[in-house]
Amino acid sequence: MNDQKEHLDTEEIAVAAYNKVDALIDLLIKKKIITEQEYEDAEQALWDELESDDDDEEEE
């Protein structure tokens, strides 16, 4: 039972962090500090890097 409570707490923390990041991105775009395209490009670059790291680990 205690493990389930810890899991829910972790999940709640992850959702709260996601919501804060989402709000921050929206604010940066609204204030024209970054464009939505710049954000999408950066996000895609991150995913590409993560996939590349996974591929490198599989080769070892």
Image (cartoon, rainbow, N blue to C red):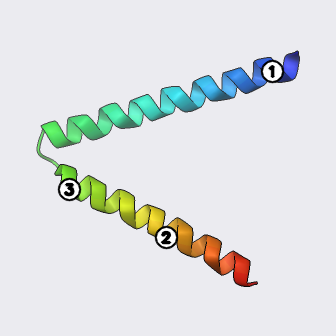
Quadrant assignment, res 42 = bottom left
Q: Earlier in the sequence, mark 1 or mark 2?
A: 1
Is 37 above or below relative to 8?
Answer: below
Is 21 above or below relative to 38?
Answer: above
Residue 15 is situated, as x and y percent measured from the top left of the image, at 52, 28
Residue 43 is situated, as x and y percent measured from the top left of the image, at 37, 57
- Neighbour tally class for label 3: few under 14, some 14-19, many 20 plus, Cα within 10 Å: few
Q: Earlier in the sequence, mark 3 or mark 2?
A: 3
Residue 6 is situated, as x and y percent measured from the top left of the image, at 77, 23
Q: Are marks 1 and 3 in contact (CB under 8 Å)?
A: no
- Three-letter residue code for mark 2: Glu
Q: CA distance from mark 1 to mark 2?
A: 33 Å
Which residue was labeled with disc 1? Answer: 4
Which residue was labeled with disc 2? Answer: 49
Question: Is the N terminus in the top left, top right, bottom left or bottom right quadrant?
Answer: top right
Q: CA distance from mark 3 to mark 2?
A: 18 Å
Which residue was labeled with disc 3? Answer: 37
Residue at figure coordinates x 80%, y 21% from the top left:
4
Residue 5 is situated, as x and y percent measured from the top left of the image, at 77, 17
Q: CA distance from mark 1 to mark 3?
A: 39 Å
Residue at figure coordinates x 62%, y 77% from the top left:
55
Residue at figure coordinates x 57%, y 32% from the top left:
14
Residue at figure coordinates x 76%, y 84% from the top left:
60
User: On the picture, is 31 further left or further right than 12?
Assistant: left
User: On the picture, is 1 further left or further right than 15?
Assistant: right
- Three-letter residue code for mark 1: Gln
